[in-house]
Image: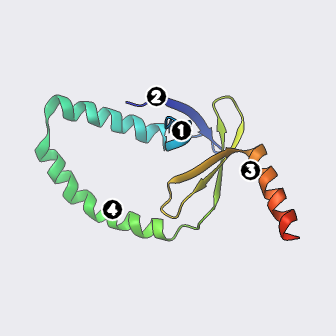
Amino acid sequence: MAKRTTHRSSKGTKLYAVRDKSGKFEDIQTYKRAHGQDIKRKAKAETGAKKAKKKKAKKTKAKKVKAKKKKAKRKKGRRTTMYSSKGKKLYAVRNASGQFKDIQTYKRAHGMDIKRDSADGN
């Protein structure tokens, strides 16, 4: 399992972030979701529940179709504000499918926005 860094979202939800070798964010999930997946993996390894997996797949198939429709409706480039474990304000940009595309400190992202606006003449 990859080493995780904890953060808090702007609403106070605990988050787990996994970084790649270069230090960029590879994946961010809520603590509740990631912890649930960890427990599921351990339980499946211990019991080898293949039948339960098939039943669940049938039930969740309809849910996945609904989730894809919701993800398609999301806006591009919308930023989520959160705080790192050290208390720094962060901006997270999501791609069209809703996954985190880029995370930067607020200070850096805001500076780039101002430079971009001055270059455009706005």
Q: Secondary structure at mark 1?
A: strand
Closer mark to the observer between disc 3 and disc 4:
3
The CA span between labels 3 and 4 is 33 Å
Viewed as shown, does residue 32 lie left or right of 15? left
Q: Nearer the viewer, residue 27 or 41?
A: 27
Q: Which residue is mark 3?
A: 109
**Amino acid under label 1?**
Leu
The CA span between labels 2 and 3 is 26 Å
**Amino acid under label 3?**
Ala
**Counting residues from the N terminus, which is met first, the one under dot 2 or under dot 3?**
2
Q: Which residue is mark 2?
A: 3
Q: Quadrant of residue 2?
A: top left
Q: Secondary structure at mark 2?
A: loop
**Amino acid under label 2?**
Lys
| Pointer 2 local density, CA inside 10 Å: few below 14, some 14–19, many at least 20 | few
Viewed as shown, does residue 44 lie left or right of 83? left
Q: Which residue is mark 1?
A: 15
